[in-house]
Amino acid sequence: MTINIKDISEKDRNAVLHPFTQLKDFATGKLGEPTIVETGKGIRIQDAHGNQFIDGFAGLYCVNVGYGRTEVAEAISRQAYRLAYYHSYAAHTSDELAILSDRLVKMAPGKMSKVFYGMSGSDANETQAKLVWYYNNLRGKPNKKKIISRERGYHGCSVVSGSMTGMSFYHDNMDLPLPQIVHTGVPHHYWGATPGETEREFSARRAVELDQLIERLGPDNVGAFIGEPVLGTGGITPPPEGYWEAIQKVLKKHDVLLIADEVITGFGRTGSMFGSQHYGIEPDLITIAKGLTSAYFPLSAAIVGEKVYEVLEDGADKVGAFSHGYTYSGHPIGAAAANAVLDIVEKEDLPGNAREVGAFFQAQLKEKFAQLPIVGEVRGVGLMAAIEFVADRDNRKRFDPTLKIGARMSKAARERGLIARAMPHGDILGFAPPLVTTKAEVEEIVGIAESAVRFVMDELT
Ligand code: PLP
């Protein structure tokens, strides 16, 4: 299909309100033309001008099985022909939905019981908050409602999930965060540790701070803690050694539920099927989206652990029906897409590939970048990684933000055919390629990234 690029660009500029886009710069053309992404195959996408890019970020860390997987497209098409839609209210279901849910309960870490479906990570975290509140109402603890998340955590953009997100530019002028959501310190050793403090000591300090925060708020007022096993949008930051172990002790002590936000880490990205398994996390509730369908269809879920579900079921005689749901909860096409994607994840052992190719990727990044004078830290796990740039390595000083080093790195990479994301908090170049990426493709990614970083570094001297 040939498209009229000028016509599409004009229509887009006139009518699309783009997320995370400077609206005036886009409207006046300062940002240039919209990129019309037309096709994708494997780890590459192609725009309407025929330019190819390696997608080093799998869309938004989501196209884990890669682009152009006909198995998934066919499963979606089959289901659309058979039954495009029916709701899941009042005990209606589809075969794909029941099979998917059974599969998720069995594969998820911890003692999981039921799966509630939405369409995005944000709405799934919105559901998690309501589950925490509902659970505590039903068990006679009506004040146990505050939810603690971390600074630089990312949990979405809707009202509750946007409040959980711990970066102020997601709150400013949006009247967030809500008072029920409280933030605690970010688990990033590089920026947060005091001189000489080991990772374990730093983790222990973060746990003491959490303990003190819960004491200050009153344990009877704190319902849950939410965290990504690996901090994602806040900078692709694996937890410091001993972090989750120390945090979970505090949560248990105060009877505070743990929500593992596995929207990025679910289905293999860290090298384990779930980030919780990778870091010994035993969640009460799990949020999944992105990798669940590899973004072939919008589908998310809140997986509910036995402990929470039992209270919900016990309370049902008193409160009646569970009054929460979306028109598209458990959409049969989404379920069919997820089953086809999970077949690929399992058959091709994508967690194993993320572990093996990921180890090669991490080693390559360290080798090529860690010693550069403008690099403060190279970090990551599995197939997610970040290079953080600093003005002064010895004194850990950031660049002047007006230099926009992260954005320039990302632009230079893109001009060389690689999409790597300028992460929003600091001068950070982020990578999260599809989980089907090979070692040869890693070499290509790292080679282009090196050329881009050296180009910007030369501009600075
Ligand atoms: N949670 C995490 C960890 C995420 O990374 C994201 C999105 O990047 C979300 C939640 C929100 O998901 P969505 O953008 O689908 O609402």
Image (tube, rainbow, N blue to C red):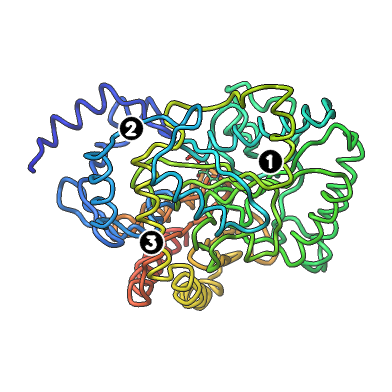
Out of 243 and 119, give the one closest to the viewer. Answer: 119
Residue drawn at point x = 43 percent, y = 66 percent: 346
Which of the 4 image quadrants contains residue 439? Answer: bottom left
Which mark is on residue 309? 1
Rendering coords of residue 20 (x, y %) = 44, 35
Please, is residue 357 above or below residue 258 in the view?
below
Q: Earlier in the sequence, mark 3 or mark 1?
A: 1
Secondary-structure class at tag 3: helix
Q: Earlier in the sequence, mark 3 or mark 2?
A: 2
Rendering coords of residue 307 (x, y %) = 74, 45
Graded by Cα atoms within 10 Å as few (under 14), some (14 to 19) or many (20 or more), the crowding at tag 3 reads: some
Residue flagged by tag 2: what amino acid is it?
Tyr
Graded by Cα atoms within 10 Å as few (under 14), some (14 to 19) or many (20 or more), the crowding at tag 2 reads: some
Rendering coords of residue 254 (x, y %) = 88, 45
Which mark is on residue 343? 3
Q: Are marks 3 and 2 in contact (CB under 8 Å)?
A: no
Check disc 2 and report the residue beneath it: 85
Q: Nearer the viewer, mark 3 or mark 1?
A: 1
For marks 1 and 2, give the CA distance: 27 Å
Q: Earlier in the sequence, mark 1 or mark 2?
A: 2
For marks 3 and 2, give the CA distance: 22 Å
Residue drawn at point x = 33 percent, y = 59 percent: 66
Please, is residue 52 above or below residue 158 in the view?
below
Q: Is residue 358 left or right of residue 168?
A: left
Residue flagged by tag 1: what amino acid is it?
Tyr
Out of 376 and 295, give the one closest to the viewer. Answer: 295
Graded by Cα atoms within 10 Å as few (under 14), some (14 to 19) or many (20 or more), the crowding at tag 1 reads: some
Residue flagged by tag 3: what amino acid is it?
Asp
Rendering coords of residue 104 (x, y %) = 52, 53
Secondary-structure class at tag 2: loop
